[in-house]
Image: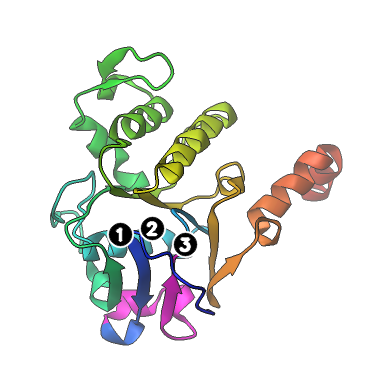
Amino acid sequence: MPRPPATPRLLLSRFRVDPARSGERVARLGFLGQGPVEVDLTSRLTFLVGENGSGKTTLLEAIAARCAIRPGGGRSYGETEEREATAISQGVDVAFAPRARGLFLRADRFHDTMAHAGRLPMATTGEWRLADELSRGEGVLSLLAARVDGSEAMLYLLDEPETGLSPQRQMALLVLLDELQKDGRSQAVVATHSPILMSHPAADLLWIDNFGIERRTLREIPHWRDMRRFMGDPESSIKRLLD
């Protein structure tokens, strides 16, 4: 991928993945089929977009490990008993601000994160409720609203945070990410399938597939094009799908 000038003040300004430096699990990732991948980040809001199984979550997990950000947040990456969570990190290098803090939310471990979150202010009403009493959608917004703190520079690594959110709540999440992006200190790298989220005008869109990782415009992202086509003429779209 061509190297655009990196923004000097980004907490995470570059990552590189080399399959030769890691094991079989890394070699199986489709986006490494053409060899090592290196990406310079240029925005405080970056979306990783690709089909299911393209490696978005695995890549986020490796970046979190190399930045010493454990799932759920904190200052160090805690190994879990579930599986070899950081296997890919052996092949990953990052340019990350020393001593910076972060929050890493995995979609498939969100329930565990919420179980330890305690009481949170609901993003829509401000009412304080126990995290495990909230729906997943309410929990995502409430947890992020509570953690997005303008007093501290943070790197947010978010894995499909739109899961469980209605379109209106996805828009609310987009506003929250916009506030983070405008803060001028924090940064977010978000794996997503949501055309609503990836429509943010200041976002950097990275498309992940078997040819590697490519920077694209919104109109070049298949998710966005397919949804736009479907919503423009749902009757014809459904007829083509079902016939």
Residue assigned mark 1: 61
Which x, y percent locates residue 21? 27, 84
**Is any atom of residue 85 visible in this view?**
no
Q: Decide: few, some or many residues near mark 1? Use Cα within 10 Å; few <14, some 14-19, many ≥20.
A: many
Q: CA distance from mark 2 to mark 1?
A: 6 Å
**Of pointers 3 and 1, the one earlier in the residue sequence:** 3
Which x, y percent locates residue 72? 23, 44
Residue appearing at x 23%, y 75% in the figure: 90
Q: Is residue 184 above or below residue 135?
A: below
Q: Secondary structure at mark 1?
A: helix
Residue assigned mark 3: 53
Quarter of the figure with residue 143: top left
Quarter of the figure with residue 135: top left
Residue assigned mark 2: 57
Image check: 49 left or right of 59? right
Q: Is residue 126 above or below residue 57?
A: above
Question: Which amino acid does the dot numbered 1 rest on?
Answer: Glu
Residue closer to the observer: 124 or 165: 124
